[in-house]
Amino acid sequence: MTARLGPGITLAGRPFPDAGDLVRRFCGMAWSGGAGGEYHELEYYDALVTDPLVLSEVDVLAAQVLNPNMGPRDRQFFVEHAADVAAWLAPIPLDATLADAPDEMLDHLERLVTAWPGGPTLSVLSKVLHRKRPGLIPLVDRNSIDLYRLVTGERVPARAWPGMLDALSDDVYDNRKALAALSAEVLAATGVTVSPLRVVDITIWMHGHR
């Protein structure tokens, strides 16, 4: 039997017909090339569940699995500013999604890049904070910035961020059926919950690293 490559999705106007295959491979599931299992971020990032109302050491260390360049200053920031980060998160409902985010919530997300001058990069912040609001806060890295440059025209993360949020919001909504199907498939196969927004991130990351 030929392995399924789909469902496909479209991001930043670019089709990813093999999104399903990329996600299955990342999550250690059977994919077109075999049984999977070479990536372990699912176990060390997504599977580690913490209190969504509390920023913990586990959240910071799990984020470092996705961003090995996190250093002592980044970790110290989250120790010293845990209360500030919690206050920034407090207005955001636990079940908020980027696809349905009202304008005021998008404005709040846009201000993330200026919330802590001299603090961690947007890449680091997004990987920690996604764990607290996985339906709303996208993960940012060079792959996602470069893909959405097709829409934003920006390569610098802080300048790309507002336009990227708008485009991602539209993309998660437009692809909602396929993303929900993949989220459900991952949960059934692994017992781990990944949001539709995380499925988008996995697709982009895997496409850039295969």
Image (spheres, rainbow, N blue to C red):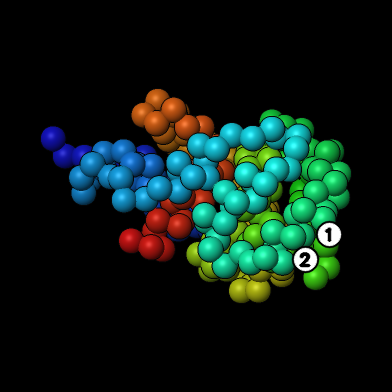
Q: Which mark is residue 115?
A: 1
Q: Picture coordinates of residue 154 (x, y %)?
A: 64, 72
Q: Picture coordinates of residue 160 (x, y %)?
A: 67, 67
Labels 1 and 2 touching (C-beta < 8 A): yes
Q: Residue at x 65, y 51 (%)?
A: 60
Q: Which residue is mark 2?
A: 119
Q: Secondary structure at mark 2?
A: loop
Task: Tell me if residue 22 can be seen.
Answer: no
Question: Residue 123 vs residue 144: left or right?
Answer: right
- Total number of numbered discs in the rendering: 2
Q: CA distance from mark 1 to mark 2?
A: 9 Å
Reply above or below: 45 against 150.
above
Q: Residues within 10 Å of mark 1 (few under 14, many from 20)?
A: some
Q: Residue at x 52, y 56 (%)?
A: 66
Q: Residue at x 26, y 39 (%)?
A: 30
* Amino acid found under the numbered disc labelled 2: Gly
Question: Residue 3 vs residue 184: left or right?
Answer: left
Q: Residues within 10 Å of mark 2 (few under 14, many from 20)?
A: some
Q: Picture coordinates of residue 36 (x, y %)?
A: 28, 45
Task: Tell me if residue 74 can be seen.
Answer: yes
Question: Residue 204 vs residue 70: left or right?
Answer: left
Judge by depth and name the residue closer to the eye, 203 or 71: 71
